[in-house]
């Protein structure tokens, strides 16, 4: 028992607004509904949890996590409550935001399953998953730097040696032994099941690109929850690596979809989970790309310094095996963050690196599935976004933004509706900055034609940014009409409202 107060639990307890006696009664009632009718707690125990840091025995921590998740309307995990036992997580950093990062492989599966389970509970009950504050980019970077740069191959080699050992419990490639039944209803899987999971990722990824994250997010989170249960088994090494890869891909999608609908801390947690899963599967390039998603999120939220911290780790931690096209992608995100700080020279230099790397990719090595969405259209789309962002500081950059947006629109493949909307908005915004309201009006209306068919809050956020640029042309009849149409198109009660 710790004799120090559990400040995490105390803070969340204060937010929930319960009395200690009320929380004790709720724990007993919730435990009964979760299949633990014998559990009984009282006010004095709640006091010890908060005031002396006593950690209750299972299943109380997960009962408390469920209660706080429902009460606060956001995912609250056992770690958030400060109730992870020694040996299951490292001692927390003093900043309190990194949840004992990095996690051990078994803890990654545990966090994955717990977090997705809570997320699904919020979905089922129609609650709003708002979340706590985002962890700072520097905090994540310092917590994960050494771990990400270390070679995880030893774990896979150890598993493989066990699989080849005649004394091992593996009797075939497609059989496995359970590691723990403590938290999961786990089942072993074989090659056919993993192949089906890999195909499902492609379906989800295509849907997200076309329609945005809102409509399929719950399905992706549910599939990720199932994979977490599968990872509770220790499969043969090759199969285990593929399962970690599926988990990484689904976690990136869950994070991206969460970001797309405005669940920002939830999104960041999924990106961290994806980084862990990719690294445990021995795929450092995928881990770096997952971190780059967290960086893109930070730029979108107006935190470019945090984004640059994350990109430094993403680029260095992705390793030497990273393909040129993947490195080009990472460069475009770093360039966008530099543009958001008004650093035009650095941005141009980084975009130049991206173009060189993209051209250096001869296509002789097939790209991983998670990179197939980054094509030449996306390269120009990201360059357009970077130049359009820089144009807020240097209006001469608007012309370059228009050139790249035009190229992106010409090259954009079908089924990428959300990216196409971003192209239109980048072009319209650049035209407004370049004092060309006629062209701006044309592309803004193209964006409005289809923006209502997506569930992407990010498209609305970018539309709001463009709306701000229309203010100086409000006296033009066509632009006045456009402004009214934008007001009607933007969802009511969103995160931000359109302002002149």
Image (cartoon, rainbow, N blue to C red):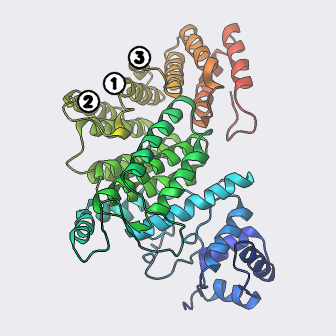
Above or below, 373 relative to 106: above
How far apart are the alpha carbons under marks 1 and 2? 8 Å
305 left or right of 329 in image: right
Q: Residue furthest front?
A: 171
**Mark 1–mark 2 contact, CB under 8 Å?**
yes
Q: Secondary structure at mark 1?
A: helix
| Numbered circles on residues, count | 3
- Toward the viewer: 294 or 196? 196
- Which residue position holds label 1? 376
**Residue 152: x percent and y percent?**
27, 63
Above or below, 124 relative to 389: below
- Which residue position holds label 3? 399
Q: Secondary structure at mark 3?
A: helix
Q: Which mark is residue 358?
A: 2
**Residue 232 visible in image:** yes
Task: Locate the C terminus and report the quarter of the image it occupies.
Answer: top right
Of badges 2 and 3, the one in the foreground is: 2
Of badges 3 and 1, the one in the foreground is: 1
Q: Residue at x 19, y 28 (%)?
A: 362
**Mark 3–mark 1 contact, CB under 8 Å?**
no
**Residue 192: x percent and y percent?**
39, 49
How far apart are the alpha carbons under marks 2 and 3? 22 Å
How far apart are the alpha carbons under marks 3 and 1? 19 Å
269 left or right of 468 in image: left
């Amino acid at each position: 028992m710790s004799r120090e107060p559990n400040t995490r639990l105390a803070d969340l307890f204060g937010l929930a607004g319960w009395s200690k006696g009320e929380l004790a009664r709720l724990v007993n009632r919730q435990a009964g509904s979760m299949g633990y009718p014998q559990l009984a707690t009282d006010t004095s125990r709640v006091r010890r949890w908060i005031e002396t840091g006593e950690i209750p025995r299972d299943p109380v921590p997960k009962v408390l996590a469920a209660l706080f998740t429902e009460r606060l309307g956001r995912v609250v995990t056992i770690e958030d409550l400060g109730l992870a036992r020694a040996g299951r997580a490292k001692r927390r950093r003093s900043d309190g935001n990194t949840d004992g990062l990095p996690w051990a492989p078994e803890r990654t599966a545990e966090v994955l399953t717990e977090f997705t389970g809570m997320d699904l509970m919020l979905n089922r009950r129609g609650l709003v998953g708002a979340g706590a504050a985002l962890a700072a980019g520097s905090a994540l970077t310092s917590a994960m730097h050494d771990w990400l740069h270390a070679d995880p191959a030893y774990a896979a080699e150890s598993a493989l040696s066990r699989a080849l050992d005649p004394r091992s419990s593996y009797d075939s490639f497609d059989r496995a032994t359970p590691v723990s039944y403590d938290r999961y209803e786990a089942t072993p899987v074989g090659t056919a099941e993993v192949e089906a999971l890999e195909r499902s990722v492609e379906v989800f990824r295509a849907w997200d690109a076309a329609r945005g994250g809102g409509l399929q997010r719950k399905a992706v989170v549910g599939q990720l929850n199932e994979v977490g249960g599968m990872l509770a088994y220790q499969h043969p090494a090759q199969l285990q690596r593929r399962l970690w890869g599926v988990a990484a891909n689904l976690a990136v999608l869950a994070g991206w979809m969460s970001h797309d609908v405005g669940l920002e801390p939830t999104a960041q947690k999924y990106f961290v989970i994806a980084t862990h899963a990719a690294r445990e599967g021995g795929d450092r390039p995928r881990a770096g790309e997952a971190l780059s998603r967290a960086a893109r999120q930070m730029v979108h939220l107006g935190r470019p310094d945090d984004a640059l911290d994350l990109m430094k780790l993403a680029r260095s931690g992705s390793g030497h095996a990273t393909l040129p096209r993947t490195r080009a992608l990472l460069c475009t995100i770093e360039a966008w963050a530099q543009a958001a700080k008004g650093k035009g020279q650095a941005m141009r230099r980084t975009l130049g690196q991206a173009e060189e790397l993209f051209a250096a990719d001869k296509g002789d090595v097939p790209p991983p599935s998670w990179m197939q969405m980054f094509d030449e259209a996306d390269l120009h789309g990201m360059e357009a976004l970077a130049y359009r962002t820089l144009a807020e500081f240097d209006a001469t950059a608007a012309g370059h933004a228009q050139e790249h947006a035009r190229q992106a629109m010409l090259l954009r493949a079908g089924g990428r509706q959300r990216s196409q909307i971003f192209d239109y908005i980048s072009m319209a915004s650049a035209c407004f900055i370049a004092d060309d309201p006629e062209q701006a009006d044309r592309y803004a209306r193209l964006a409005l034609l289809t923006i209502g068919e997506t569930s992407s809050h990010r498209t609305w956020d970018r539309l709001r940014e463009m709306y701000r640029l229309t203010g100086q042309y409000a006296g033009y009849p066509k632009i006045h009409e456009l402004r009214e149409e934008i007001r009607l198109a933007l969802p009511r009660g969103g995160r931000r409202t359109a302002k002149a």
